[in-house]
Amino acid sequence: MNTDKTISSPPGRASALMRRMGANSYDAMLVVALWVAAAAPFAIGFAIAGRLQSPALQMLLRVYLPFVGFAYFGRAWVRSGQTFGMRAWHLGVRAARGRLTVARAAVRYLLALLWWASLIEGFALAFQGRYHVAALALAVFGTAYFWIFLDPEAQALHDRLSGTRVLFIPKSPGAGDKPGADQGQP
């Protein structure tokens, strides 16, 4: 049994982008569930107090929930280099040089959070009819991820800026698949 986990670059730029979006989708569902669980005690407490629409609650949650997200992403990246979504899509995060530290993971998370916030804000602005500003916000998100097509190693902009790399981790033989399954052989 071969236990060597060869790490390589993603198998192509379009494939790299699609794998990232697949992993992001899996992780987004998990993080939203974590956010709901993390926000529930606050919502219950403020509902009991009769101040559900409190600006203080909204500010507290806007600061607290990104920390909950980083607890998930940062721990996974530093500990194993993979979130649950990245495992499913055979991706891993590594430092471009040296070890992946909490500080480097925090920079990567904050940059990625900025790109995703621009996507959400872009859609919100579009629904309000503010199409020019929405286009600008969506362009910020698009630039961050479509940087993969410009980068020599197919890395996103937040990877370049944070000194990290996302790599394809091929499935090792004997990991549950029959040999030749990918080649269409019986």
Image (cartoon, grey):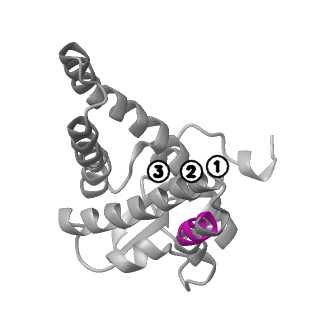
Q: The disc labelled 2 sits on which kind of residue?
A: Ala
Instruction: Look at mark 2 in the image and give the residue it sits on.
Output: 124
What kind of element bears circle 1? helix
Residue 79: x %, y % from top left:
24, 52
Residue 159: x %, y % from top left:
41, 73
Look at the picture and state if 86 lies above or below 133. above
- For discs 3 and 1, the disc positioned in front in the rendered view: 1
Query: Could you tell me which residue is drawn at 72 percent across and 50 percent down?
Result: 182
Cα distance, mark 3 to mark 1?
A: 31 Å
Residue 92: x %, y % from top left:
42, 59
Mark carried by residue 86: 3
Quarter of the figure with the C terminus:
top right
Instruction: Look at mark 1 in the image and give the residue it sits on.
Output: 127
Look at the picture and state if 80 lies above or below 16. above
Q: Are marks 1 and 2 in contact (CB under 8 Å)?
A: yes
Q: The disc labelled 1 sits on which kind of residue?
A: Phe
- For discs 3 and 2, the disc positioned in front in the rendered view: 2
Front-lying residue, 104 or 2: 104
> What is the magenta range?
134-141
Q: Does residue 164 appear to the left or right of 79 in the view shown?
A: right
Q: Main secondary structure of the magenta part?
A: helix
Look at the picture and state if 43 lies above or below 2. above
Cα distance, mark 1 to mark 2?
A: 5 Å
